Each structure stands twice: as C-alpha cells, then as structure tokens.
Image: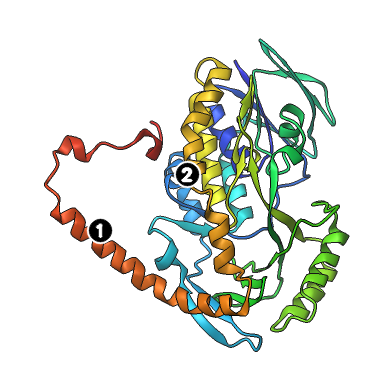
Amino acid sequence: MRKALISGAGIAGATAAYWLAKVGFEVTVVEQAGTLRSSGSPIDVRGPAVEVAERMGVMARIRDADTRVHDMVFVNSRGRAVSRVNMRTTWAEPADVELPRGDLAAILRDAVPDDVEFQFANSVQALAQDADGVTAEFASGPTRRFDVVLGADGAHSAVRALAFGPEADYLKHLGVYVATLPLDGETGADFVMYNTPGRAVAIHPANGRPIAAFMFRTPQIPQFDHRDLEQHKRLLCDAYAGAGWRVPELLDRVRATDDLYFDSVSRIQVPVWSRGRIGLVGDAASCVSLFGDGSSLAMIGAFTVADSLHGDIPAGLRAYEARHRPQRAAKENSVAHATRLFIPATWAGIAVRNVAVQLIPAANRFERARSRNTASARFVRSDHDECQHSAHDRIGR
C-alpha cells in the first residue's frame, strides 16, 4: 500500500486525509499544535466545496453548524446602526453555509477513516526525496518513508520552507493585519461592524460562540512574529488607541486573553505547487482570500489532489495543479475587494460604502433579471448541449 504524509490537520489536511484514504493510501497526518484550533473567523462552504462535503457525508452536520447570521450592521461610534445589509441574499447562494472555522475543522476530522494516523504536537523537520519516495524526519518519533508528502500547513507552511525555500520568497504582505478572539458571555443576532479610517472592529455571533475581529491597514511591520502573543497585544492596543464604540472594552479583553489569533493578510504565490513527490495544498500553495473563500478552495484542492494521484506520483501532483490552479486564480482580486468594502481608508470612503451596500441587493436583482431575459432570448439548445460542463466546474466522479 502506498503511504502518504500530510503536514497539517486543518481543513485542507483533514479533507486530503479523507480522500487519500478513500483512494487506497495509508495516511499519516502530523499537526504542530497539540489540538485542533477552535477559534478563528467564521468561514464558508460554498460552490463545488458543497459537493465535496456531500460526498464525504458531512453536509448535514455542516448545515447544523450554520451561524444563522443574516444581517451585517454598520454602526457609528455611539453604536447606532447607519447601514444594514442581508449577507445571505447579497453575497451567498442558497446552498452556501457559514460556520465557525473550528466546527468545520472538527467535522472534517471526524469524517476521516479510523485507520488514518494522526500525530498532534509533532512536525516535519527534514525532507529528502529520491526516485522511489520521500524520507521524513520529525520533531519526535522515528524517521519514516512515504510515497508522497503534502504540505497542508497553512500560509506559514513548514513543508514549503523545507522543500521549496524560505517563506519570504513566496509571501507578500497586502497591507492589512487581522486579529480575532472569542467573546465569552456575548449575545446578539447580527454581525456588527464599526469603522474608522483604515480600521474595522466587528463582533460576530458565530452560532452562540461570538468572536471579535480587528482588521486594520498598515505597511508590513518590521520583525513581526505571527507566534508572539505579547507583540500582538501591543500592536492591537496601539492601532486602536482612542477609538470609540466598544473598542476600549474589547482591548481590555485582548490584554487579558491567551486565545488571540493575529497575523498579516498576505498573498502566497508559489510558481509551481510540487517538486517531485512533495506537493502543497490549501493556503500553503496559494493564499488568496481574506473572507470566506479560502476554506472552500482548500476543500476542493484537497479533493483534487487525491483524485489526481492514481498512478505516477509526480505526474499526479502536476495534474492536480493544472486542474486546481485556475480556480485559485479566479479569486486573486478578492482581498482587494474585501479590503475596500470592510476597511475603507477614509471617512468619505466609509460614507460611500455605507450607502453602496444598500444598493447591492437591487443591483443583484437587476443582474438576475437581465440574465433571465438574455437566456429566454436564446434558441433552445439540445439536451446534449445543455448538459455539457467544463471539467474545471465539476467535481470528478
């Protein structure tokens, strides 16, 4: 039986573990953290990722974990609503689901077959490959051989650093930093956001486990360390000093917490996603989304890589990239769009955004009506033509 090593037990890693086991690999997953991460912003399962989840038998659980949050409310410094938009009808399709990141990771992990080996609090330390396989050394445990190694370990991928080169070669800071922390005891039904120029603070109910999110524009911070909690607290308190609404109270919670996620919003661009028998999936290969899309793309990519590894491993990894890279490329502009929408740089930009979001539903209705009218004017195609779809728009059977 062929053996696969996956670094990272998150969304991409768990999905890849499931599908690699299904196609006949003996799978080992190593995860640097001691447990699955439970915090983080709510994320989406949408588009072809819904079909991936359906085929894994987990879509019912994913729907049960839906945050059930519909409205985003923009407030002023006194907490008064100045604009409101229904996120589900404005940006989502009927099949889309928003759920807490930790819930999705746990659901996918639970779906993985029992014979997949998980090693938490362990990590890959060295990789050496030859024509027949890859030798992996670990922080703990013996050296082992594998037929394929996948880096599913996020934007700061250890596998990418070992096999492709230093992180600085592939990571580009996009001018935004993001932090999240859980808010015990918080109640509310809406996703509420407060803005000052270049700054945003939001509270998301997140299905009964609310979080606060901080997003702010700034050039790349010298000597930034994504693992340094005390540095993160100082940076947040400095960035939001003097802000109104509930910010002083939320900064007090920042100072007291030991569960704070903080990182740069960055674009990961790796020219080639595999080298021999070592490949990258999820954010390790290409990080393109600030809000939501990254989780769905990770699930689709993890399915695609497993579906491509039926024969020769290096050829299969190249085939996976050829199939999946166009879907990642289609999202390249999502960060810039999200930044303009959620973190306007000026007071004038905030005012324009508050008006513009009110117009989006009407614009969407117009576009749907225009599309229907255009479609009705076309001649009726044959059933055969009607059923043709691009291979890149479907999940392989």
Q: Position of residue 343 (x, y in %)?
A: 62, 69
49 up-or-down from 275: above or below:
below
The mark that comes first in sequence, 2 or 1, is 2
Q: Residues within 10 Å of mark 1 (few under 14, many from 20)?
A: few
**Foreground disc of the pair 2, 1:** 1
Pointer 1: what residue? Answer: 371
What is the quadrant of residue 151 in the picture? top right
Residue at image location 69% in from the left, 83% down from the top:
245
Q: Residue furthest right?
A: 230
Above or below residue 375? Residue 326 is above
Whether residue 65 is visible = no
Alpha carbon separation for disc pair 2 and 1 = 29 Å
Q: Position of residue 83 (x, y in %)?
A: 50, 81
Q: Nearer the viewer, residue 113 or 18?
A: 18
Is 383 located above or below residue 179 in the figure?
above
Residue under label 2: 53
* Type of amino acid under label 2: Ala
Residue under the image location 78 percent in, 81 percent down: 242
